[in-house]
Image (cartoon, rainbow, N blue to C red):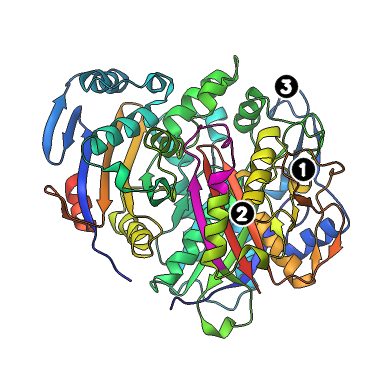
């Protein structure tokens, strides 16, 4: 019998707030951090995105902005947890692009390449806190955050460690903005997931952390109960035509949690608000038998936070379980996908004991986890 | 629940040579990375036009998987969802990230941008061989055979996968190295025991 993996502390560090509570309060009040930014260092043309605006917020010279995000998020999370991270505790970091913005200003060569490397960042962060175990770095496109939670959970199942600190972060730079612009994937306004008029995504920066433990003293806390990953094997930058592969991951995650689709209380979808992603995702939700289950996307509040997205959105959903309140999908008015999924459009009291979190990304990857009370 | 695990095939591409199951199949000393990878493709007479669109990391991983699996994987014996992979490297997609950064000032290229993620090489191999199961990409300073083996053991022992490719694929400018291993639950005539030590030994 595998051990229960408890979620003993968490944090969201985003432009909306520095703690989970601050973030959740903003979401309850319907506040979004996505706005029009006119910054020529980021883009020639103004872009709607969710960015940290206080430049003085990241003022440590030894650490890059990416590393300071990780440090800030982990600091708050472990401060609220009753564990000693210097003992028997793994550190798992997830990111898509880490310190990539250094390439825009630095001089190419071995020193720069070493500084850009995510293993360098991971080591700096591990040393900052005094983790004794070499950190693990997950980089698997937009499912990185969900994958990092699965990796941490399984690591604890093996019995090798007692605790795992899982933190995801990404910073928005010209590198990332120009790439999504070249794909014509950015919305010219605030994104509208699953909406008939949706026209693309917004990018966002931020970090989030969960602290996992198999220590039985945490009995009564939320648990990561199931997880699964799949691949479309179809296209490197376009989602599956059918959604079958994401639906496979969803079904496996639910099964892994010892539940059936009818048990799932709500879904925190990936919902990027690109035409193809939301269409595929809605098909997957239908194929998994979850068509009537309430579903939300938080991208209208945070933008797409890339390697942090799975973690930020999972932590918001955990807070929903604790407070009995489902956060709506901003910008949603009329359903614009062929499978009739049940999009939550208003702040809704919900007597939920579990949720499903999904993610999909470039490279054809899909991930799903189930968290239960 | 533990199950038998065997390395039923291995392929290492490094130092301008291609080695499968310990046997050198091809070498092209002196060629640069791009020229060498193209010569491997031509030598084995692969016919996959998408190859030409890939960045060097995807080309390297794709070629390694191609040689690894050719004649070694009985694909009809498996469901696509039972096939997956765990790959790691040190430099993520930095080789291509540098190229992409060079295009930003002119016209940012979506064809280059799409390869600015390390797991795209996994996607390319999944598309080619119809692998639809679990996969993951990890960044490690050097190949952590113990960690990678632990991931594979979890996936096979828990019946999440029935066969798994694992290993290393790394490119940065003119430095490159790839070593992929096919791990299955039953022996074959060339198989060796699946262990972290054997992964390290074969990768070299």
Front in this rendered view, residue A319 or A124: A319
How packed mark 3 is, by other alpha carbons closer than 10 Å (few <14, some 14-19, many 20 or more), is: few
Q: What chain does badge 1 belong to? A: A
Work out whether mark 3 precedes mark 2 in sequence or the reverse, and give the earlier one.
Answer: 3
Disc 3 element: loop
The answer to whether residue B143 is left or right of residue A232 is left
Chain of the residue on which disc 2 is drawn: A
Residue pointed to by mark 2: A288
Q: Nearer the viewer, mark 2 or mark 1?
A: 2
Name the residue that disc number 3 marks. A44
Quadrant (top left/top right/bottom left/bottom right) for the N terminus of chain B: bottom left
Please provide percent x and percent y for residue A32: 82, 47
Q: Residue at horizontal 59%, vertical 39%?
A: A242
Do badges 3 and 2 share one subunit? yes
Name which of mark 2 and mark 1 comes first in the sequence: 1
When asked about the image quadrant of residue A26, the answer is: bottom right
Whether residue A250 is in magenta: the answer is no
Residue B56's place in the image compared with A193, above or below, is above
Tell me residue A159's x, y (percent): 40, 74
Q: Is-magenta flag for residue A233? A: yes
Q: Work out whether residue B189 can be spotted.
A: yes
Label ID, residue A53: 1
10 Å crowding of disc 2: few (<14), some (14-19), many (20+): many
Query: Distance between the Cα atoms at labels 3 and 2?
Result: 42 Å
- The magenta segment is A225-246
In 3D space, how far apart are the residues under numbered discs 3 and 1 (Cα atoms)?
A: 18 Å
Secondary element at image label 1: loop
**Percent of width and height locating residue A321:** 73, 69
Q: CA distance from mark 2 to mark 1?
A: 40 Å
Tell me the subunit letter for badge 3: A
């Amino acid at each position: 019998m595998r051990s229960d993996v408890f979620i003993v502390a968490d944090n969201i560090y985003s432009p909306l707030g520095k703690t989970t509570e601050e973030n959740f309060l903003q979401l309850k009040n319907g506040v979004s951090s996505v706005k029009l930014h006119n910054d020529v260092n980021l883009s020639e043309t103004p872009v709607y995105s969710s960015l940290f605006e206080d430049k003085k917020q990241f003022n440590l010279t030894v650490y890059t902005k990416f590393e300071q995000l990780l440090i800030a998020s982990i600091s708050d999370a472990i401060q609220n947890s009753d564990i000693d991270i210097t003992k028997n505790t793994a550190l798992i970091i997830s990111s898509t692009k880490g310190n990539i913005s250094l390439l825009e200003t630095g001089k190419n060569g071995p020193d720069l390449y070493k500084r850009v490397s995510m293993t360098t960042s991971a080591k700096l962060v591990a040393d900052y806190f005094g983790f004794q175990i070499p950190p693990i770095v997950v980089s698997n496109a937009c499912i990185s955050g969900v994958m990092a939670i699965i990796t941490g959970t399984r690591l604890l199942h093996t019995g090798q460690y007692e605790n795992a600190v899982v933190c995801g972060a990404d910073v928005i730079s010209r590198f990332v903005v120009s790439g999504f612009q070249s794909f014509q994937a950015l919305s010219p306004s605030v994104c509208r997931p699953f909406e008939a008029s949706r026209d693309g995504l917004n990018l966002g920066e931020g970090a989030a952390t969960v602290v996992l433990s198999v220590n039985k003293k945490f009995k009564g806390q939320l648990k990561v109960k199931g997880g699964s990953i799949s691949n479309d094997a179809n296209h490197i930058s376009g989602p599956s035509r059918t959604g079958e592969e994401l639906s496979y991951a969803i079904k496996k995650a639910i099964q892994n949690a010892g539940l059936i689709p009818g048990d799932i209380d709500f879904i925190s979808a990936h919902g990027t608000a690109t035409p193809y992603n939301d269409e595929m995702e809605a098909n997957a939700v239908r194929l998994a038998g979850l068509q009537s289950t309430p579903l939300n996307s938080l991208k209208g509040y945070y933008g797409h936070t890339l390697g942090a997205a799975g973690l930020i959105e999972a932590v918001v959903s955990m807070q929903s379980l604790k407070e009995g309140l489902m956060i709506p999908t901003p910008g949603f008015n009329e359903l614009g996908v062929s499978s009739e999924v049940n999009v939550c459009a208003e702040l809704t009291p919900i007597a939920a004991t579990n949720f499903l979190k999904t993610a999909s990304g470039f490279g054809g990857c899909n991930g799903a986890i189930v968290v239960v009370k | 629940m533990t199950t038998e695990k065997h390395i039923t095939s291995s392929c290492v591409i490094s130092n301008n040579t291609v080695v499968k199951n310990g046997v050198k199949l091809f070498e092209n000393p002196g060629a640069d990375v791009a020229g060498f990878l193209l010569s491997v493709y031509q030598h084995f007479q692969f016919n996959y036009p998408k190859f030409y669109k890939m960045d060097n990391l995807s080309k390297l991983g794709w070629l390694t998987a191609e040689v690894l699996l050719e004649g070694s994987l009985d694909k009809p014996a498996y469901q696509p969802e039972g096939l997956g992979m765990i790959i790691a490297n040190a430099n993520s997609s930095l080789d291509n990230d540098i190229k992409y950064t060079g295009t930003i000032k002119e016209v940012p290229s979506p064809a280059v941008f799409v390869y600015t993620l390390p797991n795209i090489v996994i996607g390319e191999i999944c598309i080619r061989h119809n692998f639809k199961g679990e996969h993951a990409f990890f960044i490690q300073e050097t190949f952590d055979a113990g960690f990678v083996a632990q991931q594979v053991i979890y996936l096979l022992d828990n019946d999440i996968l029935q066969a798994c490719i694992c290993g290393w694929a790394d490119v940065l400018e003119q430095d490159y190295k790839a070593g992929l291993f096919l791990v299955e639950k039953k022996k074959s005539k060339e198989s060796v025991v699946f262990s972290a030590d054997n992964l390290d030994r074969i990768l070299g």
